[in-house]
Image: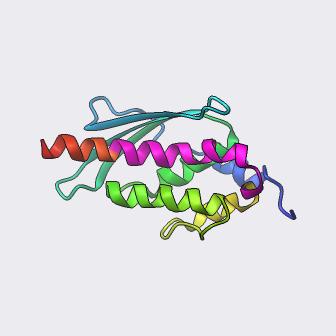
């Protein structure tokens, strides 16, 4: 492997996570925890009238890889639907397994290519995307009820 797992770009992303404040009364919330390392991400969302993320907040207690993933998510989450977020999570899962390409619309996730060889790191990288998708799905159900 030519690229290090932890590098300056990962550490820079981990230090600059957008939307690091939980929402006071979100339409949807989800907390995801990695059973391997204990990393956790809680995501809050409010959807607009078209079912797209209008406001987003997250609390991230994760390793540098999980923090970097939350940073990338935070940069691109606004305007996404629950299905777009779930599709990104599914594609990221496949990418980390070496079974697919970087999720469409999320080119910065390429930074995790060196992590493909480290299966134990995958859950932490996936947390933010899983939490955001689940929170948006929760909000969509609440909005339609």
Q: Is residue 53 above or below residue 145?
A: below
Question: Which of the pair 128/68 is nearer the observer?
Answer: 128
- Residue appearing at x 66%, y 59% in the figure: 97
Kindly tell me whether residue 78 is visible in this rendering. Answer: yes
Colour setup of the view: rainbow
Q: Is residue 130 magenta?
A: yes
Left or right: 3 as drawn, with respect to 80: right
Kindly tell me whether residue 60 is visible in this rendering. Answer: no
- Residue appearing at x 19%, y 40% in the figure: 142
Dominant SS of magenta comes to helix
Question: Which of the pair 116/5 is nearer the observer?
Answer: 116
Left or right: 39 as drawn, with respect to 140: right
Query: Where residue 123 sits: x, y (%)?
Result: 61, 43
Q: Is residue 28 above or below residue 50?
A: above
- The answer to which image quadrant residue 51 occupies is bottom left
Left or right: 132 as drawn, with respect to 92: left
Q: Is residue 117 magenta?
A: yes
- Residue appearing at x 47%, y 46% in the figure: 130
Query: Where residue 30 sits: x, y (%)?
Result: 39, 35
- The answer to which image quadrant residue 94 occupies is bottom right
Query: Where residue 85 sits: x, y (%)?
Result: 41, 56
Find the residue positioned furthest to the left.
Answer: 145
Query: Where residue 8 sits: x, y (%)?
Result: 77, 53
Tell me the magenta residue range. Answer: 116-135
Q: Quadrant for the N terminus, please.
A: bottom right
Left or right: 45 as drawn, with respect to 14: left
Q: Quadrant for the C terminus, please.
A: top left
Q: Is residue 41 above or below residue 14?
A: above
């Amino acid at each position: 492997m030519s690229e290090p797992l932890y590098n300056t770009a990962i550490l820079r992303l981990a230090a600059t996570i957008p939307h690091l404040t939980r929402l006071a009364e979100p339409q949807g919330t989800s907390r995801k925890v990695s059973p391997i390392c204990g990393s956790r991400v809680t995501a809050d969302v409010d959807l607009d009238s078209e079912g797209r993320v209008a406001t987003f907040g997250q609390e991230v207690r994760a390793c540098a890889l999980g923090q970097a993933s939350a940073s990338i998510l935070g940069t691109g989450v606004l305007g996404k639907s629950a299905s777009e977020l779930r599709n990104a999570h599914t594609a990221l899962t496949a990418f980390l397994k070496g079974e697919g390409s970087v999720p469409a619309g999320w080119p910065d996730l390429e930074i995790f290519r060196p992590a493909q060889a480290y299966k134990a790191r995958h859950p932490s990288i996936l947390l933010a995307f899983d939490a955001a998708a689940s929170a948006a799905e929760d909000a969509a159900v609440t909005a339609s009820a």
